[in-house]
Image: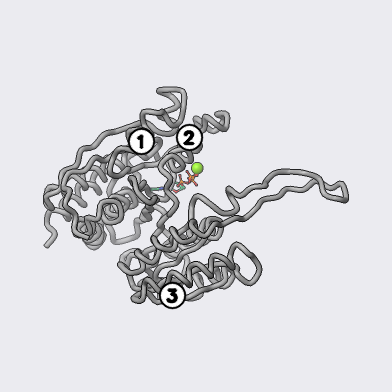
Amino acid sequence: TPSTKKSYKITLLPGDGIGPEVVSVAKDVLLLTGSLHGIKFEFQEKLLGGAAFDATGVPLPDDTLSFAKQSDAILLGAIGGYKWDKNEKHLKPETGLLQLREGLQVFANLRPATVFPQLVDASTLKREIAEGVDLMVVRELTGGIYFGKPRGFGTNEHGQEIGFNTEIYAAHEIDRIARVAFNIAQKRGGKLCSVDKANVLEASMLWRKRVTALAQEYPDVELSHMYVDNAAMQLIRYPKQFDTIVTNNIFGDILSDEASMITGSIGMLPSASLGDSGPGLFEPIHGSAPDIAGQDKANPFATVLSAAMLLKYGLGEAEAAERIESAVLETLNKGFRTADIYSAGTKLVGCKQLGEEILKSVESHV
Ligand code: ATP
Ligand code: MG
């Protein structure tokens, strides 16, 4: 659908560690790209994580959440660090991020795993298997066994200590995540693989039934099903068979980390978290990397690619998103690398300079 609104309010949450460094690059890239596509951005920086705790005493200030909710999209750097590791649980930076996700009701987590042709050798897999991998894991984020009740500790009939959790999925929860995934598959390669454990788990049986029924509404998407144990194996054996994968919270947690290792470069991978209505949350998959914070060594590509996802999935500005994606490829083609993706024969640069080079590529794009 073509976008009619051409001015967007963006909440920036730089966070901790390398967060501010990479968000600053992505902001400049958004500004320049916007100016070339007739899109205006109004940026507002807010506090989250350790930075918010230090300034206000809580990791998610009310002002941050209410502002974020009223904006069109949210771009996050990263949160956390050694400094706050001893905080009480409710004051940890990570708790602030969980509260933000809950407050925004983002139930769909999108994690692409792309093996960039220039970085094939970073993959944990052999070149011929890794080359050309471009898949998307769509993970259900707000339901399933991480949230199901009853849960807790207790005692069984033999007097032994037990711990227990419950996997619950309601039909509407499955339908809404499946719709997101079908829509994404439509825009990508037209193939959707639903991953479950329907041979053993009732929640998975319902999952498979609902996803299968919805497929009729998406005749242009080729749907397949796979058990999670097989999917874990197939991802390593021949990842190119996958285009879009949709799965529940716990399976998606595991498979998306597995998929990211196929690409081998944590500094290159973006993510998006979407709800039904309201703004999406866009962030790199890496953490705050306190070991390199403040040294201008961070790789900003993951956050720049998160900004591209913000345009594509958050604002419906696909053309502008593609311009950023092309600029990333072009910058890699020109040989510019931060230390984490450096190899002999390429040009080692810092975060800021890589940002400048990305801007040049955005500008010169044809
Ligand atoms: P979290 O628990 O917050 O998810 P983590 O502690 O598991 O994070 P990261 O903070 O992502 O892990 O860091 C893991 C390693 O990868 C560190 O050595 C870090 O320096 C490196 N790293 C992470 N992100 C980047 C980046 N954007 N550029 C360069 N190196 C990075
Ligand atoms: Mg960490």
The amino acid marked with disc number 3 is Leu
Q: Distance between the residues labelled 1 and 2?
A: 19 Å
The N terminus sits in image quarter: bottom left
User: Does label 1 or label 2 sit earlier along the sequence?
Assistant: 2
**Whole-percent x and y of residue 33?**
17, 50
Residue 92 vs 152, above or below: the answer is above
The answer to whether the residue bearing label 2 lies less than 8 angstroms from the nearest atom of ligand 1 is: no
Residue 341, visible in the rendered structure: yes
Which residue position is annotated with label 1?
A: 294
Q: What element carries label 2?
A: helix
Of discs 1 and 2, which sits in the foreground? 2
- Circle 2 packing at 10 Å, graded few (<14), some (14-19), many (20+), is many
Which sits in the foreground, 63 or 53? Answer: 63
Earlier-in-chain disc, 3 versus 2: 2
User: Is label 3 within 8 A of ligand 1 (CB to nearest ligand atom)?
Assistant: no
Q: In which quarter of the image is the C terminus?
A: bottom left
* Closer-to-camera residue (298/74): 74
Residue under pointer 3: 223
Q: How far apart are marks 3 and 1 (CA)?
A: 46 Å
In the image, what residue occupies the spot 23% across and 46% down?
353
Residue 115 coordinates in the image, percent (x, y) = 37, 65
Image-based side of 246 in relation to 199, left or right: left
Q: Distance between the residues labelled 3 and 2?
A: 39 Å
Which residue is drawn at the image coordinates 88% and 50% (left, top)?
A: 158
Look at mark 2 in the image and give the residue it sits on.
Answer: 93
Query: Label 1: how many residues lie within 10 Å, few (<14), some (14-19) or many (20+)?
Result: some
Which element type, helix, strand or loop, lies under badge 3? strand
Query: In the rendered image, which quarter is residue 116 located in?
Result: bottom left
User: Residue 247's mark?
Assistant: none
Q: As shown in the figure, which amino acid type bears the numbered disc 1?
A: Gly
